[in-house]
Amino acid sequence: QAQLVESGGGSVQAGGSLSLSCVVSGYSYSGLCMGWFRQAPGKEREGVARIYTSDASTYYADSVKGRFTISQDNAKNTVYLQMNHLKPEDTAMYYCAAKWSGRSGFCVLDQPYGYWGQGTQVTVSS
């Protein structure tokens, strides 16, 4: 049973930066598909980025491409989301999620993820 713990949210002015972390425990890190999702009040959950832990391949939603960077530290079983040039519309609860993938091609954002963190709030003021 994987456990995911996020940290690093907070409040920042537009144009600023924040970095989120997600530590994975209780599951073999290799072969996992790790995703960052966000949900703003009254809106549907949105997948923003994912990384396949075995080859570090990444994918970004168009809404964050060029501003967010997903990365990992395999030695620490940790995935990061570096968020630059933040906009007020990036305000949301951010969640880390994991699923076993087995191959990069199966690591996508629009399929169910079995393990979720508790979420961390990101607020961007104008």
Image: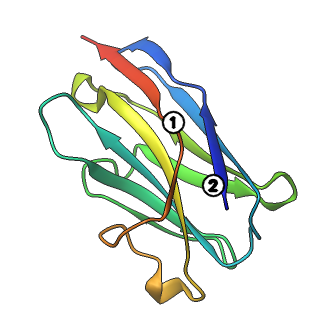
x, y percent for residue 78 = 72, 50
Q: Which residue is drawn at 48% across and 62% down?
A: 50
For residue 71, which numbered disc appears in the image? 2
Taking depth in this image into account, of 45 and 61 the one nearest to the observer is 45
Amino acid type of disc 1? Answer: Gln
Colouring scheme, one of rainbow, by chain, secondary structure, one colour: rainbow
Q: Which of marks 2 and 1 is in front?
A: 1
Taking depth in this image into account, of 87 and 74 the one nearest to the observer is 74
For residue 118, which numbered disc appears in the image? 1
Q: Which residue is drawn at 24% across and 22% down?
A: 88
Which part of the image, by quadrant, shows the C terminus? top left
Measure how far apart labels 2 and 1 are at the Cα level. Answer: 20 Å
- Kindly check if marks 2 and 1 are in contact, taking CB atoms under 8 A apart as contact: no
Where is 1 relative to 20, above or below?
Answer: below
Indicate the secondary structure of the residue bearing disc 1. Answer: loop
Which part of the image, by quadrant, shows the N terminus? bottom right
> Crowding near pointer 2: few (<14 within 10 Å), some, many (20+)?
many
Q: Residue at x 12, y 32 (%)?
A: 42
x, y percent for residue 13 = 37, 11
Taking depth in this image into account, of 39 and 3 the one nearest to the observer is 3
Taking depth in this image into account, of 67 and 52 the one nearest to the observer is 52
For residue 61, which numbered disc appears in the image? none
x, y percent for residue 57 = 57, 74
x, y percent for residue 83 = 47, 36
Q: Residue at x 74, y 67 (%)?
A: 29
Amino acid type of disc 2? Answer: Ser
Where is 74 relative to 86, above or below?
Answer: below
Sequence-wise, the earlier of marks 2 and 1 is 2
